Amino acid sequence: MTTLKLPSLADMSADDRDALERLAKRMGQNAEGLMQTGIFAVQTHWPAWLEANFEQAVASYLFPGALPPLAKEAMHVGVSMTNHCEY
Amino acid sequence: MHSAAVLRLTGTERGVAEVAAIAEHVASMTAATSAFRLQPDVPPATGPAALSPLIAPLDQAHAGDAAAALSEIEAWMRDSLGLDYVPAAWRGLAHQPKLLASTWKKERLIMGPGVLDELVKGCVALAVAEFRQSDYWISYYSHYLRTRVGLDDSALTEVAGAVMHYVSFNTIAHGMRLHPPVEDLTAADVAPGGPREEVVPGVSRRRPT
């Protein structure tokens, strides 16, 4: 049981729906797909928050800098294990 | 979730085991340096310590049964990190020679050659130290990454930025009580064409527009 029931696109304001559709397109999917499950879906109650986190992720975890993807993924696993994050 | 990515990128369960080993090892070492109340000394401290240690690190000349292990560590520090001394964390453990010897042996096993290369291992160690907010080990592994694989301030900020993301998303996953999307994975499950390849995040990620 998750903390919040996932929202439906039909219940969103026009602004939130537009923001979500715009963001979903940037993420290579559609809004319905983005809202189905997982770490992004639970942020769709506040699309502007999701967008802010996505922008930050692009500038950090997803940033193609000096570190290879394996380093980013391995760090993610290491921190999540230490933080007892089962997800 | 991201274990699937490590499985995909390494092609073996050993890759995830190596991450787990570094995570638990660094977490345990942060407990030791906190217990000793050690100030960072890698790279060499430039001023007096703000607080004195609760347990004084042993001098090598008075290390007794720990002398051999400290000599081995001294040689490694000189050859690998360009240091002419044994860091206080190791000299603190020297009060219990068997603990020092077994911990150093484990350190070299975990951080030595494996499925993950030295850059990846050092990044995991630093990331865990940053998450645990250990001044001592943040300083130690930042120096390690600068010396061993040439990371600069920009790259070390990239590590810190990534850790910020992990902490944020861990917090969301905790707060929203998300269920683990996978369990009992094998490398074969998430290999290209494998039965669970769809759970791998980011490996074939599209570049954001």
Image (cartoon, coloured by chain):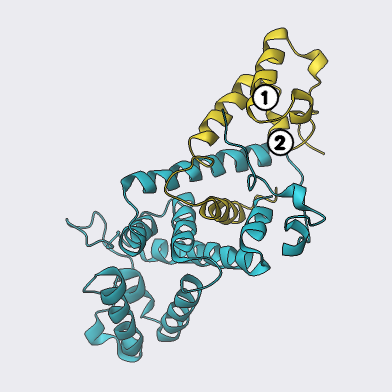
Chain colours: A yellow, B cyan
Q: Is residue A51 left or right of residue B158?
A: right
Q: Is residue B132 above or below residue A36?
A: below
Q: Residue at x 47, y 53 (%)?
A: B127
Q: Chain of mark 2?
A: B
Q: Which mark is nearer the camera, 1 or 2? A: 1
Res. B40 image quadrant: bottom left
Task: From the image, tell me which residue sits under label 1.
Answer: A25
Residue positioned most to the top: A14
Which class describes the residues within 10 Å of circle 1: few (<14), some (14-19), or many (20+)? some
Q: Residue at x 30, y 64 (%)?
A: B53
* Nearest to the observer: residue B33 or residue B6: B6
| Residue B24 in sight | yes
Q: Quadrant of the C terminus of chain B?
A: top right
* Nearest to the observer: residue B165 or residue B175: B165
Q: Is residue B42 left or right of residue B120?
A: left
Amino acid type of the residue tagged 2 in the rendering: Met
Q: Residue at x 22, y 62 (%)?
A: B44
Disc 1 is placed on an element classified as helix
Task: From the image, tell me which residue sits under label 2.
Answer: B176
